[in-house]
Image: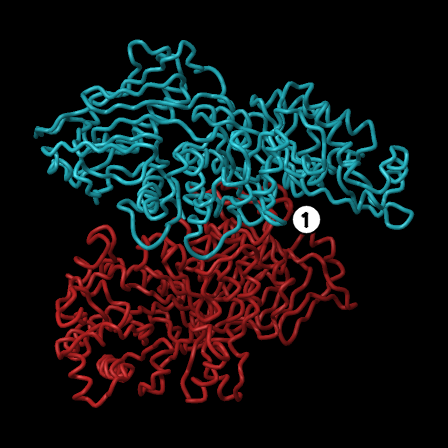
Chain colours: A red, B cyan
């Protein structure tokens, strides 16, 4: 029998309230064996026990509960059942199809009933900012039960259930008596990948969506184009990628690729929010769209180089209207990220037509007014597509008038008061906000830097309770200057897992030493599932990474 | 025809003497097109030209020259021919076996003759510190010729030849008229991998031997055991790995594994130098070898923990004698690395038997004398196996009497004068030395840190010409605390390539901007050959990494 059954007769029930801290037994002793609680991220409420059940790969089933509002036609759940069955039992099926002749005395869990409790399971929909991801999981008899109002919570609960299953020393699969009630602390828990500084093959993006689901992330922020390349293939403006991609056939995302990413993400309860950053960061746009960018001047004549989007031409806004109409139909999410960061004014300053426009508009020499003018018109255009928008913090800083449902994305970590002061300012102005400033994962250093990521808290700034409620979450950003298919996945995981727990679990879950123990096991679990997550520190996994090198 | 043939009629011949700096034509114009000179590391002498020859995958052969002292029975060359043919033509063969019907006007190279010029090719031997790696390569007619005194030079020349071949825009393989005379600046050019902090599957080690050959490295310094685990399976003392490995079956190197690594390395002209570091760094040894380590005391009784190797017992030296006898027969290289770094004296100080021994020997309270006593006896033991030894610098610093052929390995980068002062001290004492201090590749940082690695020069210290000659080379070290199969290869390459060029090429080859251009192409070449070398900066490769993620 499993190691843990040695304690089975004691039948200790361990209650952990108000967020996880440690696992204690009735007598107040801290339990040392944490094998059976290697959950990541830690659920909001967890009761666990050393009483173990067995799981047989031949008998165990994941089924729709009788009264569930979702059934076999719900492909999100059906593919999730397959995925989690595979995670739980791995290759065991291959080793023989006969039931073992030995019988063991222990009790067994033979099914997990998945019960979608609300009348609309949302199975055919897309996840969104307001999606209900809550679930309740009960493992205490032959039928384990996972209750969730919507499929989104069921997906999170299936991940948790799969993490509860462990292999004992005999190779048997076990799960301990457990009751969990869980929901995310923040609604927006994202990963930003950048496919412009380096092209990311589809395979890499999909693998990272898998890893995101293992860490309960729910937003893939796709920074799809930038100065360096334009891999997004537009139906309306095919020249953008034909001219602007690193290579127009091998280094682009076709409409079918984009669809596949969105559907693969939907199956995992992950939103795909594309970012089309303007008016800066647009050098690659200019290659396939004449007159879109501002011609820079050297003295009295054009220098041949180009600056940000040209904000004084009507053709610019016509183009943006058509382009974002396409974007809004290709990407189903209710939000699109419009960028707006790091606009360099030097080219605008050099251009005599811009100078004249500035004078005509009465902007004086304040080019941030011109930037705001552009963004204002862009926001009006995007509003007509019925999308909400996310923008980088500069747009707010420059005083652009924003719809009240705008999400202000805070990323600047320097300056007086740092990002905490910005969170105060944005929320006191009544805007929703999300945090990335301390979570730039492209910044690497020797050692366990995940601990620094883990210690940051998006609520930790000066503000009222009302202001704190306006923080909808955060994103870990892996900018692409030094990252491509060769090193992206191990650089991102398990460092991003630290951010994942911060955004999902209760605020009280913050003990780095305790987290280390769980995260070590979680990273080995990711490796067993085929994700080459790098090591936290010295040690080993039972099954080391065997991917191609 | 290839792009370069547009200039073919000009028949420019470009001479670059006294080390590579730039490619100039007769009129003193710097050439911009560097596609055809993406050599890494840069050869000592290179004459190249824009006159291009074609190579056909159906006609081209690599053959033994008529007067070569090596023939088809030389398996080093035969497997190298296969390997380089494959690198050059990749999957082209698969696309059809018929000769294309079109004919092109250009001239063609139909064979590379490999001519081992000395009477003993050394084909059946192992590479060593004094191996001749020089070669001459001439591409200027149908038969290209590679001359080398020994197979080791032929291997380096084959790598260079394969790097000269480039694909034009039509997919044709081309090579430009070229004459190269080449030899390494330093004889010892190593990579240290650490299989103790994390176990490294054989696949990872072999992949990195491949990458080493692509960068003309010739020493694999295998830091095979350490405190954390003992994966080396000893025939004489099987309990060392049975008890000391992370896992005694899945996380060990069997005698057959070790043989395979050594043979795989030999095929590439790479020496395998194992490090068995004592008396510190030996916690894992103690698990399978009773009484080997010093029992630490807490007050007047043993604390249950152990310190460095116990230097006062005769059994210790008997064990070391047997153990290193085995090591010396398993590893054919003339050198073994004996470690000797970072010995912590606190446990020795706590132990009353050690205290008594110190008094008996008249060591007073100077524990470095005890350390020296141990090392001295160990060196005497290893000398009887006819091996030379490498040791970390502390052994020299502590004044241990060393054989004059000892290699002192400099790694400490802090302290007055830094490692340069140590190089001065070691060489002024007449010892050979090699440098690792500035090349700890486990230390990572945001950005292009390869440039810092590239700028270091092992000859750049205060000393006479005689002292400089005692510097035999260096090693890039990738210690394993934060590295395993998931992230090792992209973390090592192409950063280690910077060290590779420093150790191979002429001292004058040091222009970082010029190196960048070649290294970008070299890293794409490594990717095409299946090595997931990470990007230097923004950009793309024609064929991105497609390994499993």
Left or right of A239 on screen, residue B280: right
Q: Position of residue B386 (x, y in %)?
A: 64, 18
- Front residue of A248/A497: it is A248
Count the labels in the image.
1
Crowdedness near tag 1: few (<14), some (14–19) or many (≥20) residues, C-alpha within 10 Å: some
Image position of B202 with respect to A312: above or below? above
Percent from the top left, x then y, of residue A303?
16, 66
The answer to whether residue B178 is seen in the rendering is yes
* Residue depicted at x 16% and y 39%: B27
* Image quarter of residue B291: top right
Q: Give the residue at the far front of this rendering.
A: B464
Q: Is residue A476 above or below residue A351?
A: above
Q: Quadrant of residue A488?
A: bottom left
Q: In the picture provided, is A293 more to the left or to the right than B300?
A: left
Residue at left 52%, top 74%? A183
Look at the picture and state if B385 lies above or below A279: above
- Mark 1 lies on residue: A1
Q: Quadrant of residue A410?
A: bottom left
Q: Secondary structure at mark 1?
A: loop
In the shown orientation, is residue A289 left or right of residue A108?
left
Considering only vertical position in the picture, is A430 above or below A77? Answer: below
Chain letter belonging to callout 1: A
Front one among A20 and A118 = A20
Q: Nearer the viewer, residue A54 or A542?
A: A542
Find residue B316 and report its horizontal and vertical position in percent: 78, 29
Q: Is residue A386 visible?
A: no
Q: Quadrant of the N terminus of chain B?
A: top left
Looking at the picture, how far across and down is residue A26, in whole percent?
Answer: 76, 68
């Amino acid at each position: 029998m499993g190691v843990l059954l040695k304690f089975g007769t004691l039948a200790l029930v361990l209650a952990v309230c108000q967020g996880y801290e440690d696992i204690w037994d009735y007598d107040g002793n801290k339990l040392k064996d944490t094998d059976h609680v290697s959950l990541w991220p830690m659920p909001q409420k967890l009761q666990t026990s050393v009483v173990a059940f067995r799981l047989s790969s031949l008998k165990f089933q994941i089924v729709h509960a009788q009264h569930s509002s979702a059934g076999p036609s719900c492909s999100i759940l059906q593919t999730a059942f397959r995925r989690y069955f595979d995670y739980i039992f791995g290759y065991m099926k291959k080793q023989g199809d006969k039931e073992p002749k030995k019988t063991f005395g222990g009790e067994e869990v033979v099914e997990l009933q998945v019960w979608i409790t609300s009348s609309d399971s949302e199975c055919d929909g897309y996840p969104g900012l307001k999606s209900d991801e809550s679930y309740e999981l009960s493992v205490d008899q032959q039928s384990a039960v996972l209750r969730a109002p919507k499929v989104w919570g069921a997906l999170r609960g299936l991940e948790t259930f799969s993490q509860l299953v462990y292999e004992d020393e005999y190779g048997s699969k076990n799960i301990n008596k457990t009751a969990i009630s869980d929901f995310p602390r923040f609604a927006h828990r994202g990963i930003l990948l950048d496919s412009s500084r380096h092209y990311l093959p589809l395979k890499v993006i999909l693998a990272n969506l898998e890893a995101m689901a293992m860490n309960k992330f729910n937003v893939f922020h796709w920074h799809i184009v930038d100065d360096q390349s334009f891999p997004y293939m537009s139906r309306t403006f095919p020249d953008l990628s034909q001219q602007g991609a690193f290579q127009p056939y091998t280094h682009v995302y076709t409409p079918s690729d984009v669809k596949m990413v969105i559907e693969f993400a939907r199956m995992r309860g992950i939103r795909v929010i594309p970012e089309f950053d303007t008016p800066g960061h647009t050098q690659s746009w200019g290659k396939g769209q004449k007159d879109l960018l501002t011609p820079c001047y050297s003295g009295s004549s054009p220098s041949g180089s180009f600056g940000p989007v040209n904000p004084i031409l009507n053709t610019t806004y016509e183009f943006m209207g058509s382009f974002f109409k396409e974007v809004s139909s290709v990407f189903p999410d209710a939000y699109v990220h419009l960028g707006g960061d790091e606009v360099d004014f030097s080219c605008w300053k050099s251009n005599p037509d811009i100078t004249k426009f500035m004078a005509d508009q009465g902007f004086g020499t304040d080019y941030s007014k011109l930037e705001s003018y552009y963004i204002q018109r862009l926001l009006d255009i995007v509003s007509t597509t019925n999308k909400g928008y996310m923008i980088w913090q500069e747009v707010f800083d420059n005083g652009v008038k924003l719809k009240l449902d705008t999400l202000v994305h805070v990323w600047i970590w320097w300056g007086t008061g740092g990002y905490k002061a910005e969170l105060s300012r944005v929320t006191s102005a009544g805007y929703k906000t999300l945090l990335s400033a301390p979570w730039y994962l492209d910044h690497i250093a020797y050692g366990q830097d995940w601990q620094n990521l883990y210690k940051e808290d998006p609520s930790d700034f000066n503000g009222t309770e009302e202001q704190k409620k306006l923080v909808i979450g955060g994103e870990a950003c892996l900018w692409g200057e030094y990252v491509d298919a060769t090193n992206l996945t191990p650089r991102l995981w398990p460092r991003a897992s630290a951010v994942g727990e911060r955004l999902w679990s209760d605020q009280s879950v913050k003990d780095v030493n305790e987290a280390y123990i769980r995260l070590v096991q979680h990273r080995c679990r990711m490796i067993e599932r085929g994700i080459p997550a790098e090591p936290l520190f010295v040690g080993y996994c039972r099954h080391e990474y065997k991917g191609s090198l």
